[in-house]
Image (tube, rainbow, N blue to C red):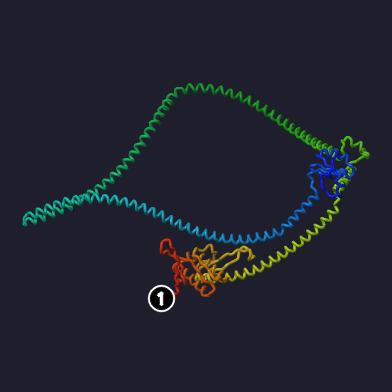
Amino acid sequence: GIKAIEPEIKAPDVLKLALSQIGVVESESEGRKALDALLPGQSIVSREGHYWRWDGYCIKADAKDRNAQHLEYKNKLSDLSKRLPALEKALEAEQDKLSKLTAAIEKLDNDIRNLRQAVQSEERSLSDKTRSLSQGREKLARQNAELESLESRIKTAKDDSSELQNIIQAEEAQLAAYEKNANDSAASDKDDLYALLNQAREAHQDALRVFDRYQQQQSTRKARLQAIADERVSLRNRNIRANERVKTLGARKSELEEKLKTLKSQPRTFEDDKQRYLGEISKFETLRNTAGESLSVCEAEVLETGKALKAAENALGEAREKRAHAQATLAGLSEQIDVLKARIDEKFEMRPQDLAQHISMDTDDLRIDDLEQYKSQREKLTGERESLGAVNLRAEEEALEIETEVGKLLSERNDLVQAIEELRSGIATINKEARARLIVAFDHVNGHFQNLFSRLFQGGQAHLSLIDSDDPLASGLEIFAQPPGKSLQSLSLLSGGEQTLASIALIFAMFLTNPSPICVLDEIDAPLDDSNVDRLCNMLDEIAERGETRFLIVTHHRLTMARMDRLYGVTMAERGVSQLVSVDLQQSFEFLEEAA
């Protein structure tokens, strides 16, 4: 009643006979029921993957198959072999990218270090400017205060000037009247008029002095009035605080009076309350003594009860431990019995009580040692049977195919190993040559750098050093410099101008090692003072005289422009119209010499 697997699987004709002896069931329970009906050579598989053979050999659905694992490993190996060249190329590309990224990172680190130094310099400059701004603001505030004071003084002076002008006008009117009278009078009265004029002038001076004293007294009075006004405000505030204090003290006084009345009325009731409380205290003491005696009796009883309770709890704990141990032993024995029943049912398909009817040996004389011997013999035979595995009709053909594939894989592996060795040999050769060239180039650059540093600083010394590794290809570069009058230190510890000169020396050291026909320098003299700019121009002239390099310099420094052979600039003669302007300074100097 079980359907064969052969119609449902497409296979070669040589396998049809073997497939016709394999049946298919829907579930594991159906397969176990049909296991007893299998004839020699027949087997059953379920939809889930369970397998039963006629001799009792079983394979669970979740068991691993060595052949499937071998095929899986074989497929993975072929995929990896195909992907190996692409992976090696990708590795080389990634290594190139890594080297480029490492160089870029080093450059970015240098840029970041320079930017940090620039930021620190800008922060110092900003703090100086902030300090100057605060000082300027304070100065402006003082000047504003002085300006207000001067304005008030000017206003007062204007008022005084207007009053003096009025007095002068009045005096001039009197003087004009006197002069008119003098003209009308006779010549004999001329001396008297002059005397009157002098008296008027003296009176005018006295009036001015009186006016000055009046102005001083008025300013004194204003200051006194201001002080009185301030004192008045202070006294008003003190008066307000005093009134509030008086209100607080009044409320406190009323509270104390009420409390005093209460305290005065209390002594009248003290004696009565005292007698009453003494009687109650004696009663309470009697009750306390009685309760103390009862308490001592109860405590003794509680102590005895506690001892008995503790002994009972200890006995109960021991009983519980024994019961738990017995229950655990019983549960373990029950589980062992269930496991034995399941194994007997699985192996022999009968109940344990029916085993005695099917045993051919005499169990009465059976000893424990014999049982262990039979058990080890059974396990040995079972292991030998399971080690045989399932019957594979194509085992020989598959073995030949696997041997052929293994031979191919070993050949390919040997080719890969040989290619890897050649690649490693080539890499080692390249690294060796690169180290030699790097050391030679480093020595040339270091020599030029030491010479140029001493010339730019007019003394001192500097050198380049490979750090962090003994391998030149993996080491870093550090610049050590010692300007005149200073100790030997790293480039990052120098000032901004010193770092610029050292960097210029390093740039031209590399440039002298591998010169180029054209060199463009953009604002290289911006952080330098006039003397250092002159040294830089002298060095440029010496390098240019060799005839190997022509320099194009972008600059705004007047000394650099004066030392150049030609100047190129952009001007805007008309609005919105730019025009290129060039000047040949050497030709201009020749014209000047001829004109001289």
Reply above or below: 47 against 406: above
Q: Nearer the viewer, residue 541 or 68?
A: 68
Tell me where residue 383 appears, x and y as whole percent: 86, 47
In the rendered image, which quarter contains the C terminus? bottom left
> Is residue 447 rendered to the left or right of residue 538?
right
Tell me where residue 9 appears, x and y as whole percent: 82, 46
Asked whether the viewer can see residue 52, the reply is: no
What is the quadrant of residue 310 in the picture? top right
Name the residue that disc number 1 marks: 592
Residue at point 50% right, 59% down?
Answer: 118
> Is residue 204 rendered to the left or right of residue 21?
left
Residue at point 79% right, 47% down?
Answer: 64
> Is residue 482 rendered to the left or right of residue 181?
right
Tell me where residue 153 appears, x and y as whole percent: 28, 51
In the rendered image, which quarter contains the N terminus? top right
Q: Nearer the viewer, residue 485 or 159?
A: 159
> Is residue 355 rendered to the left or right of residue 485?
right
What is the quadrant of residue 569 in the picture? bottom left
Reply above or below: 218 against 291: below
Q: Which element carries disc 1, helix, strand or loop? A: helix
Q: Nearer the viewer, residue 350 or 266?
A: 350
